[in-house]
Image: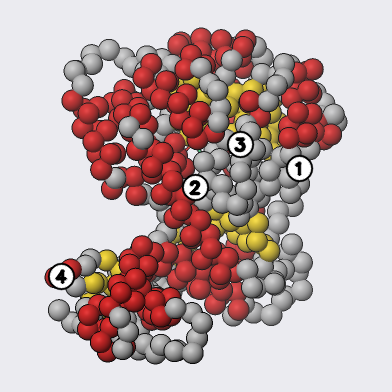
Amino acid sequence: MAVVELPITLDRDSPAPFAVQLAAQLRQAILEGTVRAPHHLPSSRRLAADLGVSRGVVVRAYEQLAGEGYLEGHGAGGTRIAVRADVRAPARSDPARPRDEPSRPIIDLTPGRPSDTPFADRSWRTAWREALAEPGHVDLPPALGTSRMRAAVAAHLATARGLNVDAEDVIVTAGTSDALQLIVTALRSRSPTPRVLVEDPGYPTARRVLTAAGARIETLPVGPDGLRAVQLTTVDPVPDAVLITPSHQYPLGGRMPVQERLALLDWAAEHRVLVLEDDYDSEFRHRRMPLPATASLPSQAEVALLGSFSKTLSPWLRCGYLVVRGTSGDLLKETRARLDSPVCGVLQSALAHYIDDGGLARHTARARRAYAHRRTLLLDRLANRPELGLAALEGGLHAVVRLPASVHAEDLAARALTRGVRVAPLAPYYAHRPPQNGLVIGYGAPSDLQLTRGLDILLQLIDTTDPPDGKDRT
Ligand SMILES: Cc1ncc(COP(=O)(O)O)c(C=O)c1O
C-alpha cells in the first residue's frame, strides 16, 4: 500500500479551523492531481502527529472529504483517494487517436441526467425483491396503472408537492414523452391535427414527440419568468392545449408568478384550452420554496399535471404519471384504456414499495443535498467570471451559462468534447427565435470531481478562445 506524502501547511494564525484548512488543502491537492489513486492517505494518527494537531482534526477533515466523494474507505484498509480514472485529464499524446475523436471516458455535463445513487440504495433493492416475490401475475397491468402505484403517486405528490390528489385521477405513464403521446392521441379524437402551444425556448423532446404523435406545434417566445398571460390574447387560432413549465422554465429557469398562472387559467377556461403543466423537477428547489402547482390553483380550466421519475430516480425506468380531472381526465382515461398501459407491472410494484417505504423521500432528500452542493461548486467556479451569465440555478439539476459573443457555444462544445467533456449548446432548445449563445450544463450525474474538472476544462477553453472574429453571436 503506497502512502502518499502530503504537501500540507497549517496556518496557525488563520481564523479558519485546522480541519477546514486541512480539508481545503487536501481537496486542492486531489483536484490538481498532486495526490491521486491508488495512493492511500496516511492514517489519521500519523498525519495528526506529523502536523502537530489532535487526531480529531484529521478525522473531521477526512470525513468531510469522504462526504464530498474525494475519499473512500476507512479503518485497517486505510483511507483511499477516490479519484476515478474517468476524471483524470485525458492522455495528451496518443498518436493512434485522431485529433477530433473524443478521448474516453467522457465527463458528461449534458442535462437531464440525475444522480445514479438510488440504484445503490438498500431500500431500492428491497423494493425490487418484494415486487419480484409477489405471486405471479398472468394478466396485463391495468391500463391506468396498478391501484397501489396510483395511490403511491398520490401520496408522493402530497408529501413532495403539497398536492391533494385523488388516486383515481392518476394515470401511470412511461414518462412525460408517453404522457404527451397519450394526450395527442386523445385530442385527435376531437380534432385531426390538434394544435399545441409550447414555450420557445423549450423542451426539444416535447416538440419532437408532440409532432410525431400528430400535433401541430405553435410556439410562444418566453421571457425570464416564463410565459406571460398577456401574450396568449394574441394567439389565433386558439390552440387545443398549451404546454408550460411554470415552476422552472425549461431550460432558462424562470418561474411563472402566481398572478400569471391565474390569468393563464382564466384564458384557458374561457377558450377551453387544456393546460399541460410539465412539473419535471420541482422536488429539487435550492433556494426558494416551490410555488404551488398550477394544477392546484382554483380555476374552471382543465389542467393535466405531467410528472416523471426521470429526475427523481432515473430516465432509465421510463416511468411517470399524469394527474387530470374533468372531461379531459375522462377522455385521457378512455384513450389509455383503448391503448393499454406501456408500463411494466413489476416496475410499478417496485416503485410503489419504494415510495410507500419512504425510500423515494429519503433518496430525494439525499439527492437534493448532493445537487445543492454541486450547484455551489458550479457557482464557485463560474460566478466570479463576469463575462458569463448564469441562470436556472434556483432549482433542478441544470444551469444555463450564457457566453460572450467571442465564444461560440457550438465551437466550445465541440472543443470540449475533444478534451473529454460533453456539454449541450443552448441553440437546439429554441424553435423559431434566434438562440442565445450559451450552454446548458447538467450537474445531476457527474461526481463533484468530474464536475469541477469539466468546468475547469471549459474555463480553460473559454480563456484560450481566439480573439473575436467580428460576428455577433448573442
Ligand atoms: C422539461 C422536461 N420535462 C420532462 C422530462 C422528463 O421526461 P421523461 O419522463 O419522458 O423522461 C425532462 C427530462 O429531461 C425534461 O427535461
Q: CA distance from mark 2 to mark 4?
A: 37 Å
- Residue at x 74%, y 39% (from the top left corner): 257
Disc on the earlier residue, 3 or 2? 2
- Secondary element at tag 4: helix
Quadrant showing the C terminus: bottom right
Closer mark to the observer between disc 4 and disc 1: 4
Q: Position of residue 339 (x, y in %)?
A: 44, 15
Are the two marked residues, 3 and 1, in contact with CB atoms closer than 8 angstroms?
no
Name the residue type under label 1: Pro
Are the two marked residues, 2 and 4, in contact with CB atoms closer than 8 angstroms?
no
Disc on the earlier residue, 2 or 1? 2
**Residue pointed to by mark 2:** 112
- Residue at x 71%, y 40% (from the top left corner): 256
Closer mark to the observer between disc 3 and disc 2: 2
**Residue pointed to by mark 1:** 221
Q: Which mark is residue 207?
A: 3
Q: CA distance from mark 4 to mark 3?
A: 53 Å
Q: Could you tell me if residue 124 is visible in this image?
A: yes
Q: CA distance from mark 4 to mark 1?
A: 58 Å
Position of 139 compared to 457: left or right? left
- Residue at x 50%, y 86% (from the top left corner): 14
Q: Any atom of ligand 1 within 8 Å of the CB at mark 2?
A: yes
Q: Position of residue 278 (x, y in %)?
A: 59, 34
Question: In front: 221, or 377?
Answer: 377
**Residue pointed to by mark 4:** 77
Disc on the earlier residue, 4 or 3? 4
